[in-house]
Amino acid sequence: MDLEVILFMAPILMRKKSMTDKLFFDTDCISAFLWVKEENILFKLYPGKIILPKPVFNELNNPSIPHIKRKVNELCLNGDVMIYSI
């Protein structure tokens, strides 16, 4: 590959990499893994990349589903999941 092609492709390749730096999950997706107690699959596939938007976190912190609330709080404290305001 010559230098012109490399210089042309570099921004495209860098942009592709940055698109998977953080993965935002909605309530349905993350709760499906939490309900069946298989969230470890996500952490193996995407370590350090899982983001919950603040509204999703608030929804999962519903006191009427204490086991999900407890698990989400535990994951946040362990650093497995990050909360972002968007």
Image (cartoon, rainbow, N blue to C red):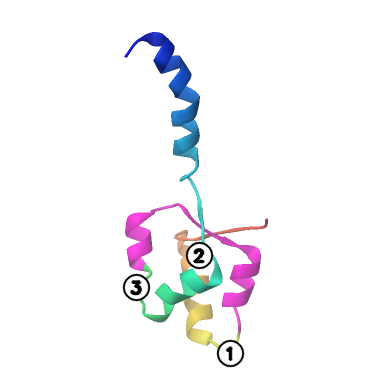
Quarter of the view holding residue 2: top left
Choose between 58 and 4: the one closer to the eye: 4
Q: Position of residue 55 (x, y in %)?
A: 65, 68
Mark 2, residue position: 77
Say which of marks 1 and 2 sits in front. Answer: 1
Is 1 on the left-hand or right-hand side of 67? left
Say which of marks 3 and 2 sits in front. Answer: 3
Q: Amino acid at mark 1?
A: Ser
Q: Amino acid at mark 3?
A: Glu
Q: Position of residue 31 (x, y in %)?
A: 48, 75
Residue 64: numbered disc: 1
Mark 3, residue position: 38
Residue 30: numbered disc: none
Is 72 on the left-hand or right-hand side of 38? right
Magenta range: 40-62
Q: Say which element carries label 1.
A: loop
Position of the N terminus, as image quadrant, is top left
Q: Assess whether residue 10 is covered by the magenta stretch.
A: no
The residue under the point 47% across, 70% down is 30
Q: Residues within 10 Å of mark 1 (few under 14, many from 20)?
A: few
Q: Are marks 3 and 2 in contact (CB under 8 Å)?
A: no
